[in-house]
Image (tube, coloured by chain):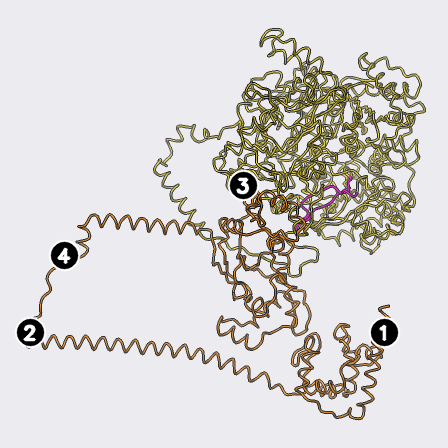
Chain colours: A yellow, B orange
Amino acid sequence: MSSNKKYWKSVEELKDSSIVETLKQNEFVQEIPTDEFLGDKDTLEASSTTRRDFLKYVGFSTAAASLAACEGPVVKSIPYVVQPDRIVPGVANYYATTIANGFDFASVLVKTREGRPIKIENNTLAATNGSANARVNASVLDLYDSLRVQGPMKGGNAISWSDFDSETTQALNSLKDSGKQIVLLTQTYASPSTSKLVSEFTEKYGNVNHVVYDAISESAALDAYQAMYGERGLANYDFSKAMTIVSVGADFLGDWQGGGFDSGYSNGRIPTNGKMSRHIQFESNMSLAGANADKRVPLTPTQQKLALAQLHSLIVGGSVNANDLPAKIKDAVQKTASELIKAGSNGVLVTGIQDVNAQTVVLEINTKLGSKAFDPKTPIKTRQGNNKAVQTLIADMKAGKVGAVIMSGVNPMYTLPNASDFAEGLKNTTLSVAFTSKEDETASVVQYIAAAPHYLESWGDVELKKGHFALMQPTIRPLFDTRQFQEVLLKWNENDVSLNDYIKSTWKQSILNGGSFNQALHDGVFVNNTASVNVTSEEVEQVEAPASNAARTLAASATSKGLELTLYSKVGMGDGQQANNPWLQEFPDPISRTSWDNYLTVSKADATAWNIVNENDSTGALNGSYVTLKLGETTLKNVPVIIQPGQAKGSVGLAFGYGRTSGLKDEMKTGVNAFTLYKDFNTTQNISIEPAGGMHEFACVQLQNTLMGRGDIIKETTLEIFNTYDSQDRKNGWNRIPMVSLNHVETPVTSPEVDLWDEFDRSIGHHFNLSIDLNACTGCGACVIACHAENNVPVVGKEEIRRSRDMHWLRIDRYYSSEETFAEDDSKKEGFSGLFGDNGSLGGFGELEDPADNPQVAFQPVMCQHCNHAPCETVCPVAATAHGRQGQNHMAYNRCVGTRYCANNCPYKVRRFNWFRYNGNDEFDYHMNNDLGRMVINPDVTVRSRGVMEKCSMCIQKTQKTILDAKRDGRVIKDGEFQTACSAACSNGAMVFGDINDKESKVAKLLEDDRMYHLLEYVGTKPNVQYHTKVRNTSEA
Amino acid sequence: MKQVIHRKLSSNYLRLSLIFLLTFSTSLFAQEGDPVVGKSLFNANCIACHKLDKKMTGPALRKVESRLADAEGLDREWLYQWIKNSIGLVKSGDAYANKIYNEYNGAAMTSFPTLTNEDIDNILAYTNSEPTAAPPVAPGTVATSSTSSEGGISNKIILGALGLLFALLAGALFLVNKTLTNFAEAKGVVLAESPKRTPIWKAFIQNQFLVFVTVIGLMLASGYFVYGYFMQVGINQGYEPVQPIHYSHRIHAGDNGIDCKFCHSSSRVSKNAGIPSLNVCMNCHKSIYEVAPETQAEGLAEYGVDYNLEIKKLYDAVGWDDAEQKYTGKTSPVKWIQIHKLPDFAYFNHSQHVIVGGVECQTCHGPVEDMEIVSQHSPLTMGWCINCHRETDVKVKDNAYYTKIHEQLYKKYGKENFTAAQMGGLECGKCHY
């Protein structure tokens, strides 16, 4: 069944397959550019170097080089004078800490080697607190950012902290009685001790106004929650408890309301006992949640409001006029409502519409349903920004009512749409301080830059959810002369205790309830539902109240005035504070597979109407038209366009986080700033669009490493078929083992008789397998960054990515397929006769999939498959790649001579060639080109040099370490001890790693699962990576 | 419970010492002890913290009694009290006791309630002895070194004399020969002339076969040497760099028999054996501020090294003020020169070999305990690694990790022992990743 479906990776693949054909034939698209120096005949002839001279030079230099190599360099080895107790050179230490940068909040485990943090891992003790996403995984590299502010500054000159203290304290004291406000404009800290510090600060200086500002605001949801439950927070959702999940414009697998919902979601997506959750998504942009949905309805933001209002009236009651909705959508809404009603307490509804009424409607519906997944009792605390307060602040600043603005963790000059108003307001203040780790946009307009440390150098505490506390502890001494905002608050409060003592006493007083602080610090988390931190003078919040009949008001507000823009955040960039992180810049967006850019996503139909094109040049690199966006007075010029299958007609999308201008390297200044269009903190805007000249060059890996037309690399089925038929059923089997003909008898490809090779005994010792469940994988990409960090994968830059020279060892392929049901695909395919003509398969496939429609999406993480019969191994002329009996395909870099034959012979296209030396090379000025950035390198993995092939090693350094530890302790290895970087990073349970010779292990059981298949099984490579067939719950309940 | 017992014990001690006090109280004063017995007592009890002529953890003790009597007016009775129960004396508010207690930063002297007054008298007698022990050694060292150097000179003279003798003999023979020839000529004896022969090199050139064979031989020989030369490029066997501090493994690991892993402790748990940090050196060298005179002499004579100066270098590096017996905080890390270098692309884990494999350090590093300066003993080539993996049986006994694997292997191959190679120790990815 599954093999009948046709998959495509990009629009171009359908439209014009000639490029794709070329690419299929060409593993390495670009030839070695000999033309550059050999092509020009004149220069060649003018050159005074004859061939004989050239040979002489070569001879001499070779001789000189080999003579020079005879003497080994003298290497100094310098031990500690006094070795710290806990540090043993060569042994990693782990510390539990918490990231809380205002956008990402997660409990993490930090791996340090010789005192250097080198990797972020999930803190498994903190299951409730979300897990590390791609950005959090990459955050360790921010610590070693060469552009960090190295000390406090005043007007561009370095000053000392004592000067800073005395000058600012003086300024604050003089403001004390002036009647002007002292404003603390901060990120969401959600920190009990920081709140306490701020209230003490308020007590001391009087007229203090603490404004919490989230760059990407969730204020509407906060207001709605506050109006209903009387507390500022966000309702918590546990999607593992829901069987019917409906989302209206909420990318809850992305950054919606702080993110971290994906592991619960994935939990319910794995079909167990014939059941899995059903997910219906109404949205305009193709989001991660939409890509994972069983049913996706593309509709504009205005229609979303109407649909939500109608859902409300159908479920809760009331009469909302939703006649403006197209019949098809209306029908979908009605079906969804009945499904939700049927699901009752098993259903849940979420929305991402930034409207207090919409958010109220959702709370009402979930309450009405009695949803088990909906948990308003432990609200999420990690978003506390208040739109109204921020707007008031800017007005007050302009009116001259504000004496001092002290900012921490925010970058309003970049993230505010009216940044110029803010800058103007700043001029009216007598004191302006920005706590920042970069000389960012805001730092350039303030008087004082207070150099702030990275979170891995800081103390802190966070209340992630009500009653769920987490501690932040330093894992390295501050690299620079930095101070935390909280430390300076202590100074300003004339409190001499150190910050960690302060936090300790706060915790002892109000949180720990007699528990041990050291234990909490060790665990990183502490749960106490009765804890309360005494914070005095909590100001009355300016809250936008929902209307009395929220649904009707919502429907009434749904009026569209032209093209609708939905602003969103990418999993790879978030709100843009990590824009100088090369790992994140090079991280391909899960949906568009484009790195190093943001872009306007446009539907195919709209693109044709506006004459916007996307085309691939001969190397497969993607180019796209530019447009100019207009919103009132604001224009955003030269926005590149990507035609996005699944984008709702009449809507466009643009990602935040790009278009930064200061505090980052030139290479990282990519994309356009979407915050300029973020008027009134509303993610949907009515804009107009104008074509602009020229074509933009994208670094899109979409068409790269094509699979030679072997589309059936992915297998999927529906829940109905999955439950009805046996996987090997001759007609309807949904996961049949491919058959080959042996002596004219159909034989399964897995049987030893059809094998070219002799199987080699792997039953003794370990035999590693990695299992990837396509149902649980949401495509979030945490594994990609984790792999980067663990394996010293270099960053190659936009130009190289365009040349198909990306180095990711692990890629997440994204496939589109069109028809809602398999039957439609099938019936059309059955009807093909011949190649050409109306029913010809050549044109027919093109018609079959209309990208303008609403495609189904599937994600498939692909890394080296570690084939037991590896095609790469047989062709290597120098035996640089060889097989280990533990199931890993080894790659000896020092042996490799770079013929690239292995990559050409790999059916999975997972081998990567080092075209250049990417470390210590000015042409690749990323983290590996400076001493600070190189501190993140994992000392257990070789840094590859130019001219060698590399690929996923199945984290052999980790498996070997696990084995060695067990040998040294003289014990048997338990299941779960073996991990790869990707499987450890995957909190969704999509990746499971282990030893299949341990019959009790999870992965051994997964190998026997019905859904298990190997990629391109019929090639007979016998991979050690298993995949589990994707099952879609398409049956309408 | 324990505390009660302890209290009982200490009260017993007190009682005992009281009895002793009472019994010997008459003979307490003006007792002159035996310095020989005193020396052995001193070495048994005091030497960990005191030296006669040098301040260590505690003050220098030579002539402590007379010093105290002169400077502080304290008698031997005070010393008895102090030695037997110093803390008690401090607590009692004794002025000098408190002074000295504070001078040593509140580090109380260990109480010796078991020492009798007689013992203390003996010890004091030893401390009162004149510093006679040291001088005889010093001349001795000088003497030995001077004799050895004299020996060197005299050898040369003898050789020179012999050489001269031979030259004279040769000259004499030549003269005799010349004279005899002259005589013969004078007497008219005709000396037979040797027949003219083709010079050997001409004969050689004329023999083409011989030339051919020689050329082949030469080519083979030069090929052999060139090959040998290239194969040793990058192999630093015998590499013996001069280290910033002349650290003698011979003395530490050899003479003193300190276990390798005592200092290179991370070799048990880590991939790095680790060069010990300087605080590890100071665990011993805080009290060992100079080497024994014989060792010093040997160092000067055989290796030209003043070991005591090398210890001073350690003190400078770690920031130890030997006179004041405290750390100054000024450190300068020692920049050792790495001897054993593996390339970055080869993974080697010490703990795997040392703990799991139970391989002796000397297997790879050679007889370090005999090396004055460590040199690279093994070639550290891949062939060398592989060879050992092929020959060495894995230690599977009493290791739960191997139980199942060994059982399966035994079933399959029917033998008891398996080499590392048979267990997959030759796979590329085991060492290269």
Q: Which residue is drawn at 49% across and 82% down?
A: B143
Q: Disc 1 marks which residue? A: B7
Q: Which residue is drawn at 71% across and 16% down?
A: A822
A215 with respect to A359 (left or right): left
Range drawn in magenta: A105-125
- Secondary structure at badge 4 equals loop
Measure the C-alpha gap from mark 2 to mark 4. 28 Å
- Secondary structure at badge 2 equals loop
How crowded pointer 3 is (Cα within 10 Å; few <14, some 14-19, many 20+) is rated as many
Q: Disc 3 marks which residue? A: A892
- Looking at the rendered image, the quarter that the N terminus of chain B falls into is bottom right
Q: Which chain carries label 2?
A: B
Q: In the image, what residue type sits under mark 2? A: Val
Could you tell me residue A766's position as x and y percent? 64, 41
- Secondary structure at badge 3 equals loop
Q: Disc 4 marks which residue? A: B198
